[in-house]
Amino acid sequence: MTTTNGRSTARRATRADINLAALQANVQLLARAADKSELWAVVKANAYGHGAVPCARAALAAGARGLCVALTQEAVELRAAGIDAPIMVLSEQPVTDIPLLVRNKVICVAYNAHYIAALAAESERIATRQTTSQRDAIPTQVHLKIDTGMHRVGVAPSDAVECAELIASSAGLELHGVMTHLATADDTGHAATQRQLDEFRRVLAEIRQVAPSLRHVHAANSAATLRNLLPECTMVRVGIALYGLNPGDGVASLTRELRPVMTLRTEVLHVQRVRAGEGVSYGLRTVMTGDTTVATLPIGYADGIARRAWQTPARILVGGKPRRIIGVVTMDQLMVDCEDDSVTIGDEAVIFGTQANATVRVEDWAAALDTITYEVVCAISARVPRHYSRA
């Protein structure tokens, strides 16, 4: 237990160590891959579990030109922390959020006429309340999102020019950019990517007829940035790769120089010898086939470790060796099989990261759980303290 300002604060053995120097190295590497396009750092979902404010500051210091988030509250959090860099919220928000977005000078993404009208009305309402000296302020910047085939959000290509005209004709808005999102950029053999890019180019040419002075054109996520797709884009939106993680198996060969930013570690809480025939954890669903040493770790599904991990090839490092999880993962604890090795309370356990000469990667956990790297790190809950360094 430590003391801060006269108050006792508990020390938790479980922690996520965030290496901001690794993040900055990744920013610089990806900025080179983006070539002449600006790199905007995606820090939504608490920077994919890494901590939005520290990661945003580190990314900007390393050369990122702007930030991307998913929610109004995420943009407001960054502004409240004193970050004045450009921030884009990547989809339409509840109309009731628009005053917050406009007041915080957030770049808004739009694709529905009613949302564009509401943005325009709020921007013009604020403009009428400004003094003469304030009226040279930049209007609300809007990026029009085109649905070129992912079919999640975005305006249909047939309606894109009409939406562009709505934005461009509003006194309170600036059509600052046009964008799309690629559904299969991490799959180098999928034909849909080229179809989406061709459709985006076609619609973009039509929009330029009504908005010839667009500041930004963008389509690239992490995978597309690594592949240098659509090089005529003026910016790229890079998320998972910033954190040193693979966007997908199809681009794994392009991520070898990236450095993982998060190490998740804990300590052995309890050690016991369990005899053959005895069961472990709820339901006693793992029955030991021989005598073994079981180490209990203070981390569980409330921290982001999947309850079903015991049924998978997922491994945890203890004593420099990969250990299998035995028994159902519980809310606050899990158990690992240490066989006949010597293990002591307080020994380090690494969920993902490096210990001695062994490494377990986030990608290994993703493969074991039949999911993606994004889900593994985003699942690490808020009750796991983040520790930041520039090592």
Image: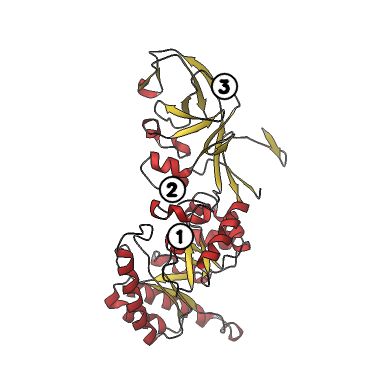
Location of residue 178 by image quarter: bottom left
- The three-letter code of the residue at mark 2 reads Thr
Q: Quadrant of residue 83?
A: bottom right
What residue do we see at 53% from left, 73% from top? 36
- Residue flagged by tag 1: what amino acid is it? Ser
Circle 1: is it few (<14), some (14-19), or many (20+) Cα within 10 Å? many
Report which residue position mark 3 lands on: 343
Looking at the rendered structure, the secondary structure element under dot 1 is helix
Alpha-carbon span between mark 1 and mark 2: 13 Å
Residue 87 in view: no
Residue 317 visible? The answer is yes
Could you tell me how far apart the alpha carbons at marks 2 and 3 are, in whole angstroms?
A: 30 Å
Would you say 52 lies left or right of 217 here? right
Front residue (pair 262, 360) = 360
- Residue position marked by numbered label 2 in the rendering: 373
Please provide percent x and percent y for residue 200.
34, 74
Residue closest to the far left: 158
Give the residue displayed 47% in from the left and 64% down from the top: 237
Percent across and percent down for residue 145 are 37, 71
Mark positioned earlier in the residue sequence (3 or 1): 1
Q: Residue at (35%, 76%) from the top-left corner?
A: 201
The foreground one among 174 and 191 is 191
Q: Secondary structure at mark 3?
A: loop
Q: Label 1: which residue?
A: 222
